[in-house]
Amino acid sequence: MQQKKLAYVISFAAFLIIIIGMQNNSAEAVQLKAAVYLTQAEIPKKVTERGLIGFARRTNTKRLRETQEQMLKDRQWKAHLIISFNAPPDDLEYQVLFYDVHDGPRRLVDDMSSFVNDRKQKTYLQKISLKRPRFKPNRNMELVVVVRRREVSRLQFGIIGQEAARSGTIEFTDSEAKL
């Protein structure tokens, strides 16, 4: 009789372990993904999370235009980055990597770490500023969002701007020509 009770207890414990294991696997099966939007439009002041995502979809841009400073070296590309995860990232930070893909293979240009205040939040908004000379005008770029060293989203975009004008002529003085 006692062996039957022991067998029932062991079977029940094994059953519970299997059920708990299956629940953990199903939680991990939900892969974290994100929708990424870039906009240069002014963000509305009082907007809900759903309204922000709708605004981002409407004003999403594939080409960033540079600012109009007088000096070419002071110009930059400013935008708002909106990231909407399908589930909370459940981490303290996520990274945004910027790659230049204009000439073929990806070349890392810059990275940006963002720390999270609320681990359960799903949508994030932040201003970005891509400055010269690290970023060059008229290039195709790729933005990659990484959480826990895993790529969760990518977005290809272009940056448009004025390139430095060069005359193509070289002038030498007499003293430089003698060297």
Image (cartoon, helix red, strand yellow):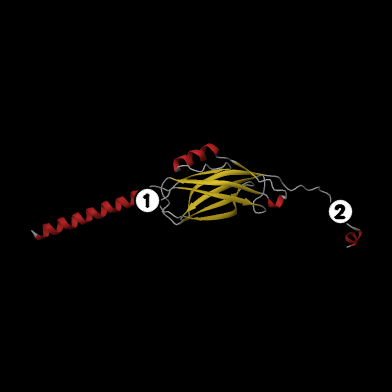
Give the SS element for disc 2: loop
Residue where numbered disc 2 is placed: 171
Q: Among all residues in the image, which is located at the extreme top?
A: 58
Question: Is residue 105 or residue 125 the one in the foreground?
Answer: 125
Residue at the (15%, 57%) spot, across then down = 7
Residue 140 found in image quarter: top right
Please state which amino acid type lies under the numbered disc 2. Glu
Task: Tell me the CA gap for discs 2 and 1.
Answer: 66 Å
Residue at the (16%, 57%) spot, across then down = 9
- Tag 1 or tag 2, which sits nearer the N-term? 1
Residue where numbered disc 1 is placed: 28
Q: Residues within 10 Å of mark 2 (few under 14, many from 20)?
A: few
On the image, the x and y values in percent for residue 54 come to: 48, 38
On the image, the x and y values in percent for residue 74 come to: 69, 52
Per the rendering, the mark at residue 37 is none
Instruction: Give the side of residue 118 with respect to residue 77, left or right.
Output: left
Please state which amino acid type lies under the numbered disc 1. Glu
Residue at the (52%, 56%) spot, across then down = 113
Quarter the C terminus occupies: bottom right
Which label sits in the foreground, 2 or 1? Answer: 2
Residue 63 found in image quarter: top right
